[in-house]
Image (cartoon, grey):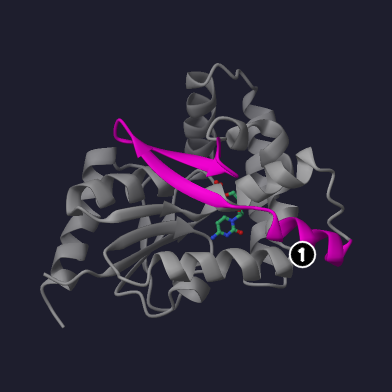
């Protein structure tokens, strides 16, 4: 069996992280949530009032940022400079600024190079927006996940509610669509489907069904080539 790289891209809240996590666990692979890295940078920029328009300030701030992932009780937690920020990076104040931060070329350069290093040995599932196009253009398996907007809003609301955050569907929808707009139209590595990615619409699929579907594709790649 080959230790392949699996890239999962798609719009906000269509279940990329759930699929990536399930798949990594099923295959015994590592999992990297690249969005969490952009969120951690955004949290640091907010807490240190870094001006996005000031390139020197951005580059200096990036030098002061160390992002790590640690696994505890089957869960993946994000650490920023040694501090567990898993909850903070999912907050609305971070969600509202993360797309503008992720559009800054210096930020992308720094994070893409860390992401490439994390995948050097293969045996990894990474989800994001530019994984199949920029981070791992040679990934053996590329998935472009989609789901209908209403379903994405419903899932995101549910996820927030589980964290004790109750927001109206309108507010959640506005944030999702605005992020999609910025992520898809930025000049530097916009969200787009890689030519060789397989499109999966999971609107009507259960978590188990989507896992089985992609696990089958992954195993086929792992036993060939
Ligand atoms: O996957 P997520 O919703 O947690 O990602 C948060 C933001 O980070 C998303 O709106 C765009 C950005 N992002 C990106 O530009 N490139 C990636 N590979 C992953 C995320």
Horizontal arrangement in the rendering, residue 216 relative to residue 99 (left or right): left
User: For the magenta stretch, what is the residue range?
Assistant: 54-83
Quarter holding the C terminus is bottom left
The picture places residue 184, in percent across and down from the top left corner, at: 64, 63
Q: Residue at x 50, y 55 (%)?
A: 34
**Label 1's element?**
helix
Decide which of 14, 45 is in the foreground and name it.
45
Residue 169, image x, y percentages: 62, 27
According to the picture, the residue beneath numbered tag 1 turns out to be: 59
Q: Position of residue 215 (x, y in %)?
A: 20, 56
Q: Is residue 210 visible?
A: no
Q: Is residue 129 left or right of residue 50?
A: left
Front position in the image: 177 or 214: 214
Asked if the stretch drawn in magenta spans residue 32, the answer is: no
- Answer yes or no: is residue 9 visible: yes
**Number of numbered labels in the structure image:** 1
Which residue sits at x=64%, y=36%? 173
Of residues 80 and 220, the one nearer the viewer is: 80
- Residue sitting at 48 percent across and 45 percent down? 148
Residue that protrudes farthest toward the bottom in the picture: 225
Q: Quadrant of the N terminus?
A: bottom left
């Amino acid at each position: 069996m080959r230790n392949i790289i699996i890239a999962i891209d798609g719009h906000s809240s269509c279940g990329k992280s759930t699929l990536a996590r399930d798949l990594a666990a099923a295959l015994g692979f590592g999992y990297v949530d690249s969005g969490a890295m952009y969120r951690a940078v955004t949290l640091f920029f907010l807490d240190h009032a870094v001006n996005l328009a000031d390139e020197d300030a951005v580059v200096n701030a990036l030098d002061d940022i160390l992002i790590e992932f640690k696994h505890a009780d089957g869960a993946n937690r994000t650490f920023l400079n040694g501090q567990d920020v898993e909850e903070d990076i999912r907050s609305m104040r971070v969600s509202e600024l993360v797309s503008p931060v992720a559009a800054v070329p210096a930020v992308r350069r720094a994070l893409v190079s860390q992401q490439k290093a994390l995948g050097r040995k293969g045996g990894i599932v990474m989800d994001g927006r530019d994984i199949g196009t920029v981070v791992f253009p040679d990934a053996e398996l590329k998935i472009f996940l989609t789901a209908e907007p209403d379903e994405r809003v419903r899932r995101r609301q549910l996820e927030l509610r589980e964290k004790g955050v109750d927001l109206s569907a309108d507010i959640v929808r506005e944030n999702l669509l605005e992020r999609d707009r910025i992520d898809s139209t930025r000049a530097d590595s916009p969200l787009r489907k890689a030519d060789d990615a397989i499109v999966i619409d999971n609107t009507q699929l259960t978590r188990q069904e989507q896992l089985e579907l992609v696990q089958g594709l992954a195993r086929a790649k792992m036993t060939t080539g």
